[in-house]
Image (cartoon, grey):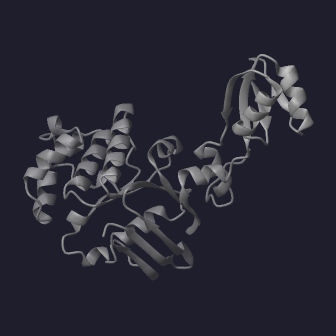
Amino acid sequence: MNSVEIRELTKRYGTHRAVDGLTFDVLPGRVTGFLGPNGAGKSTTMRLLLGLDRPTSGTATIGGRHYLDLPDPLHRVGALLDAQAAHGGRTARDHLRLLAAAGRIPPSRVDAVLEQAGIASVAERRIKSFSLGMRQRLGIAAALLGDPGVLLLDEPTNGLDPEGIIWIRELMRSLAADGRTVLVSSHLMSETAALADHLIVLGNGRLLADTSMEEFIDARSAPRVRLRTSDPVRLGAALARDGFELVTSADGRSTVEGIQAERLGILASREGVPLLELSDERASLEQAYLDLTADHAQFTATH
């Protein structure tokens, strides 16, 4: 009921295809990171899913139904697309009260989400006095108002301080653990790496990847081991016999390309070489993402 289904979704603006034949699912019980360079089609896809734009072809549905056909949409889907959209002359509480009334949501939910978002103490302040981070929290409170099974969040950490970023990370994970569907668009690779279980990556409106975080990084990481040993000469000789090279840096740590820690550990044990440290090194999400999207960025700097 809470899955998001995108099928052959296309959106053209004149001759430009903002979204080009997308097909993927966003499933409940996990946080899905939605990545891509500027102009990749992420925001357009979310707008199509929420019925704010009409697709040229294809479908974007929630539990098999279009958003505009849902009888109580705020109870099914919570979205944050633009934290600046709230009327600056209203108080935070009044903004949420209006949304609750429009969505047939009990007024008690207003106080609940103000507390959940950490802005209960400023609920009577006018929104125009809010910082960007406070507006983000209000937008997230609005998304949570109907206690929905699906959350669509575009850059939810924008403007948040470190405490706020940790809060949104824990919130998204807890919502997914409750069996909800959580789709989070972000440009912050470090936050996506800490938050997401699964990744959808777009480039030029097309689907580039639909995979788990672990598989995405592993597919773009050559095996590499970092280690420290008290006998680098003997270990280096043993590795050389198997076709590997031990490279030692000034701090005493060494790296070996093309091998995994398990195999190197077995080799060192066989040779009786003590290992003081041993770990696999993997590419970061940022490195893997840049590797995949290098040819799909709309704007790139020259050096």
- Residue 292 found in image quarter: bottom right
Q: Is residue 22 above or below residue 88?
A: below
Of residues 303 and 22, which is closer to you in this image?
22
Residue that protrudes farthest toward the bottom in the picture = 57
Q: Position of residue 60 (x, y in %)?
A: 40, 75
Q: Who's the residue at 16% across and 52% down the image? A: 95
Q: Who's the residue at 50% across and 49% down the image? A: 187
- Can residue 69 be seen in the rendering of this structure? yes
Rendered-image quadrant of the N terminus: bottom left
Of residues 62 and 78, which is closer to you in this image?
62
Q: Is residue 121 above or below residue 107?
A: above
Q: Position of residue 50 (x, y in %)?
A: 33, 69
Q: Who's the residue at 38% across and 42% down the image? A: 169
Of residues 211 and 124, which is closer to you in this image?
211
- Can residue 86 be seen in the rendering of this structure? no
Q: Position of residue 15 (x, y in %)?
A: 56, 79
Of residues 159 and 260, which is closer to you in this image?
260
- Residue 99 found in image quarter: bottom left
